[in-house]
Amino acid sequence: MLKKLRELLFFTLVALALAPTTSFAVPSFARQTGMDCAACHTSFPELTPFGREFKLNGYTLGERQLIPLAAMAQFSMTNLAKNHDNTGAQIMAHENDPQFDVFGIFAAGKLSDHAGMFVQWTYANNGIVNTEGRLVGHSGLDNTDIRYVLNHDIFGKNTVFGLNLNNNPSVQDVWNTTPAWGFPFNGPTLPGVPGPAYSTMIEGGLSQQVAGLGGYFWYDRHLYGELSLYGNANKAFRILSAGQNWNDGSVTRIDGRTNPYWRLAWNEDWGAHSLMLGTYGMQVDIFPDPLNPNGPTNRFTDTALDVQYQYLSDPHIFTVQTTYIHEKQDNKASFDQTCDPTAGTSCLNAQNHLNTFKAKASYLFNRKYGASLAYLNTTGSNDAVAFSTGNNLVTKPDTQRYELSPI
């Protein structure tokens, strides 16, 4: 009986996922601008050209709200075709169990005619695994993006100049090809769900652990450029990593406050069409031991290319996004400290590389019915230390997968 009830609930959730929906966004922005969420988003979190303008202009359009707050909740049920590994051990707990996943509170809106913010606080019901091996809840500051902007004419063309403070490299970006707001947009939060075991540093490896301060320009609604510098979100910047434990070795420690993130993009809008061609990247120096942030560091350099195309009309919306990230890992500090060839054990390569390729196409009819298809591929060096599964049978990070999901 219980199994049938679970199956019924699962198919009900699937039916709801496939049912007509209206794209949603942060309601406080909608109240501020007086516009429907569809003005800024195709389906959340994908931005329209107007949504990109709103963000690049510091969230300042419209009237400032007295209490710019909003909230969201997420529920899910996850089923795996094979929920055990080759040894028979269970891969994921709570399979087919309805789960309350996430509750988020947003403080998002206009602060003044030249300043605005997007700040998210999130409670993850299955946030961490405790020392007893049980899933427990965890809360903390999530994506944060605070801006100050000015507008000037340069050679007769409007130019936006902005300053930005954030805690996740690329969260400030306005195209949905960079990691913070890139696809896949959503998924199960339960530990053990199959996916890439390794990813580049810019793909969330520093999220909510760093503080970045930088400047950008947006020239004539065509050319975007940015340079931001990142350091640990501790001491004066501790609020940007609220909820992180800096004393248990779980937080990545980077050296200094001048680790650069860069972005350059060209955008062209004509009629119902929009096309962006861009590049972005980051270089960061990381201490091998997060509990001992001193001495030599390993250097990770991520360089990426990305493209986004949108066709926005009534009733058809079509989007294509793709990005390729190449990461060079200089492991000199770890290599010098841990490698002992005379011990007869495997040594970490002095240099490794990791590559990520993602491509996604989606279609939305009448802003209610739609689906997306994505392809994700990860490749990299052969290194039994850096990319081992623990049994040395797999020594490369190579994975690939397809994702088909309703919108």
Image (cartoon, rainbow, N blue to C red):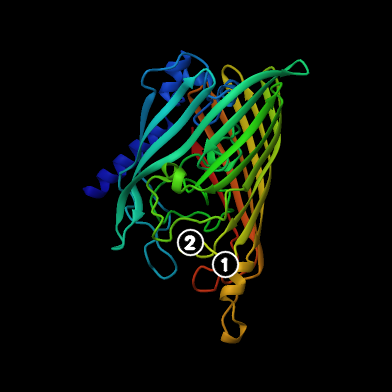
Front one among 1 and 249: 249
Asked if residue 248 is positioned above or below residue 53 in the image, the reply reads: below
User: What type is the residue that disc 1 sits on?
Assistant: Ala
Q: Is residue 45 left or right of residue 105?
A: right
Circle nearer the N terminus (1, 2)? 2
* Residue 175 shows in the view: yes
> Is residue 72 toward the left or the right of residue 48 in the image?
left
Residue 276, horizontal then vertical, whole percent: 69, 31
Residue name at image x 64 percent, y 26 percent: 161
Which residue shows up at 67% across the image and 26% down it?
218
Give the x, y percent position of residue 88. 39, 68
- Total numbered labels placed on residues in the image: 2
Identify the secondary structure beneath mark 2. Answer: loop
Q: How far is the residue under mark 1 from the one under mark 2?
A: 17 Å
Q: Is residue 402 left or right of residue 101?
A: right
Q: Nearer the viewer, residue 195 or 249?
A: 249
Please tell me in which quadrant of the rendered image residue 48 appears. Answer: top right
Residue 216 in the image, given as x and y percentages of width and height: 64, 32
Q: Amino acid at mark 2?
A: Pro
Find residue 350 and report its image quarter.
bottom right
2 or 401: nearer the viewer = 401
Is residue 20 visible in this depiction of the protein? no
Residue to which mark 1 is pinned: 386
* Relative image position of residue 341 (x, y in whole percent): 62, 83
Which residue is outermost to the left? Answer: 1
Q: Residues within 10 Å of mark 1 (few under 14, many from 20)?
A: some
Above-or-below relation of 162 to 305: above
- Numbered badge on residue 290: 2
What residue is shown at x 37% (from left), y 62% (from top)?
A: 90
